[in-house]
Image: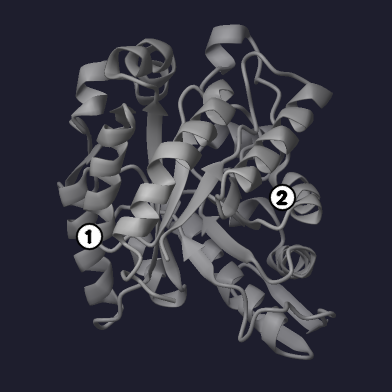
């Protein structure tokens, strides 16, 4: 069955302090009431799109703490989109993740990435390194996490990390271990897809998504990964209302016009001359169903609904829960059977 998750509003321009946690709790409960499956948290230390505009980072909740709290009070699955592995010692990350797997009763996906915002690394004292080094650290971290989950005692001698007699008890519920998904799109980053279970794709143009998926499948010797897709969306009863409420946040987020965002023509050039296009689905339920259906036919099994603006998340959940998700599940009930 196709699954639907929510990109949690971990930061906000309007909702601050304790109220930000209360809002996320309300989002989680609304998602559960409306038949969604999963809660996803981004892992940032600064609210990265606002520092220059308000003079400081927006309030933002720490991801592992938030996910643990919400897993304890709902029956929804939880995951990270994505956890920045260079921010944390990998053995401790394995311990945190194993505990979340237990709290969520085995409904947990460890989404991981190498990080990209220099200011966060420097601001929290991690030091900044070139992308290749961050990838190497991320690869070692993945190896250590799997060992800690699987083995009774772990010793590891790597370039960046060394463990002597590490133990992790209790082990995760999921066997052989919780799935690890990697978030990335460039050719160098995607080399890590050989060591993980799934790909957590950014909001790519459908054709670019398929091209990157083919590339990943080839890297994995013909084995397709588990597939999640971050689906940026604004929904209302008609196109005009959806555009009106989402235009400021989408244009600020993507740095492009709403027209280019809606047509998925916001382009980025990757190393090696590869160009990929990003965008968001804005409109009424019919428009959202049309775009989701395209991605499902391309292999997506799990959508992370990223509502814009984030403050509209509860309204978006209600629209999707009433009009979109029931249709999709009926239309594609025989596809991607578990």
Q: Using the image, tell me which numbered label, if any, was put on residue 297.
A: 1
Q: Position of residue 28 (x, y in %)?
A: 67, 42
Residue 43 appears in the rendering: no
Q: Quadrant of the C terminus?
A: bottom left
Q: Quick one: 304 or 145, which is closer to the camera?
A: 304
Q: Position of residue 85 (x, y in %)?
A: 60, 57
Give the residue at x 63% y 64%: 108
Q: Position of residue 106 (x, y in %)?
A: 69, 71
Residue at the spot of label 2: 67
Whether 59 is drawn above or below 176: the answer is above
Q: Classify mark 1: helix, strand or loop.
A: helix
Cβ atoms under marks 2 and 1 closer than 8 Å: no
Crowding at mark 2 (Cα within 10 Å: few <14, some 14-19, many 20+): many
Whether 146 is drawn above or below 249: the answer is below
Please state the total of marks drawn on the protein image.
2
Whether 264 is drawn above or below 13: the answer is below
Of label 2 and label 1, which has the lower sequence position? 2
Give the residue at x 21% y 19%: 259
Which of pointers 2 and 1 indicates the residue nearer the eye? Answer: 1
Q: CA distance from mark 2 to mark 1?
A: 30 Å
Which color mode does the image show? one colour
Give the residue at x 18% y 31%: 265
- Specify whether 254 is left or right of 79: left
Q: Quick one: 110 or 76, which is closer to the camera?
A: 76
Q: Quadrant of the N terminus?
A: bottom left
Give the residue at x 68% y 32%: 123
């Amino acid at each position: 069955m196709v699954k639907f998750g929510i990109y949690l509003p971990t930061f906000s321009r309007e909702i601050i302090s304790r109220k930000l946690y209360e809002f996320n709790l309300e989002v989680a409960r609304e998602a559960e009431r409306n038949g969604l499956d999963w809660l996803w948290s981004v892992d940032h230390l600064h609210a990265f799109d606002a520092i220059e505009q308000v003079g400081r980072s927006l309030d933002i909740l720490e991801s592992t703490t938030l996910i643990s709290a919400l897993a304890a009070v709902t029956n929804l699955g939880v995951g990270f989109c994505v956890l920045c592995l260079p921010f944390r010692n990998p053995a401790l990350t394995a311990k945190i993740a194993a505990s979340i797997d237990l709290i969520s009763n085995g409904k947990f996906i460890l989404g991981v990435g190498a990080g990209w915002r220099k200011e966060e690394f420097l601001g929290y004292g991690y030091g900044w390194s070139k992308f290749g080094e961050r990838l190497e650290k991320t690869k070692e971290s993945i190896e250590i996490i799997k060992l800690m989950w699987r083995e009774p005692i772990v010793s590891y001698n790597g370039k960046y990390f060394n463990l002597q007699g590490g133990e992790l008890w209790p082990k995760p519920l999921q066997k052989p271990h919780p799935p690890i998904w990697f978030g990335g799109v460039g050719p160098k980053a995607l080399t890590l897809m050989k060591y993980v279970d799934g790909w957590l794709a950014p909001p790519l143009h459908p054709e670019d998504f398929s091209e990157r998926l083919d590339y990943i499948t080839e890297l994995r010797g013909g084995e397709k990964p588990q597939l999640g897709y971050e689906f940026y969306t604004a929904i209302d009863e008609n196109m005009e209302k959806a555009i009106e409420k989402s235009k400021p946040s989408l244009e600020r987020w993507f740095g492009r016009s709403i027209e280019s965002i809606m047509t998925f023509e916001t382009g980025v050039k990757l190393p090696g001359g590869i160009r990929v296009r990003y965008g968001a689905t804005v409109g009424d339920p019919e428009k959202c169903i049309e775009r989701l259906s395209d991605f499902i036919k391309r292999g997506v099994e799990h959508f992370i609904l990223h509502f814009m603006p984030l403050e509209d998340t509860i309204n978006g959940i209600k629209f999707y829960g009433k009009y979109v998700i029931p249709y999709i599940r009926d239309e594609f009930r025989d596809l991607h059977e578990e």
